Amino acid sequence: MARKRKNPADNWMPSRVRRGKSAFEFLTPDGRTIRLCDFSFTQAEMWVAYEKLLLSYKNEETLAALFNAFFNSPDFLNLSGETQKDYGNMPIS
């Protein structure tokens, strides 16, 4: 369970979302900050921006996305043609 926020007026925000200098910001687990939307947005619009951000993260972390990232990586392209062909024909179970 997340701790209580210093400003009780911000309790409506999802976890990892805070008020930045000029916009609502999402703090990633690795310490980066991603801008969600301006302060002029309503609470509902901010939640929509938050949900869109979460969906984009989920799409990047699928197994198919990981396979595509590997097959397009320099490590894979440096392998011999025969090895690349073998890796492409591996059954996924």
Image (spheres, helix red, strand yellow):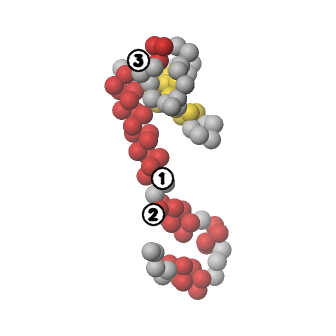
| Image coordinates for residue 91, horizontal then vertical, percent | 46, 79
Q: Nearer the viewer, residue 60 or 8?
A: 8
* Residue that lies at the very extreme toward the left in this rendered image: 44
Relative height, residue 31 to residue 38 (above, below): below
The residue lying at 38 percent from left, 29 percent from top is: 47
Residue carrying label 3: 40
Question: On residue 8, which mark appears?
Answer: none
Element class at badge 3: loop
- Which of label 3 and label 2 is nearer to you? 2
Determine the image quadrant of residue 41: top left
Question: On residue 60, which mark appears?
Answer: 1
Can residue 19 be seen in this snapshot? yes
Residue carrying label 2: 64
Question: Which amino acid is tagged 2?
Answer: Ala
Figure disc tally? 3
Determine the image quadrant of residue 74: bottom right
**Disc on the earlier residue, 3 or 1:** 3
The residue lying at 57 percent from left, 38 percent from top is: 28
Question: Which amino acid is tagged 1?
Answer: Glu
- Which of label 3 and label 1 is nearer to you? 1
Query: Decide: marks 1, 2 in contact (CB < 8 A)?
Result: no
Q: Is residue 91 left or right of residue 30?
A: left
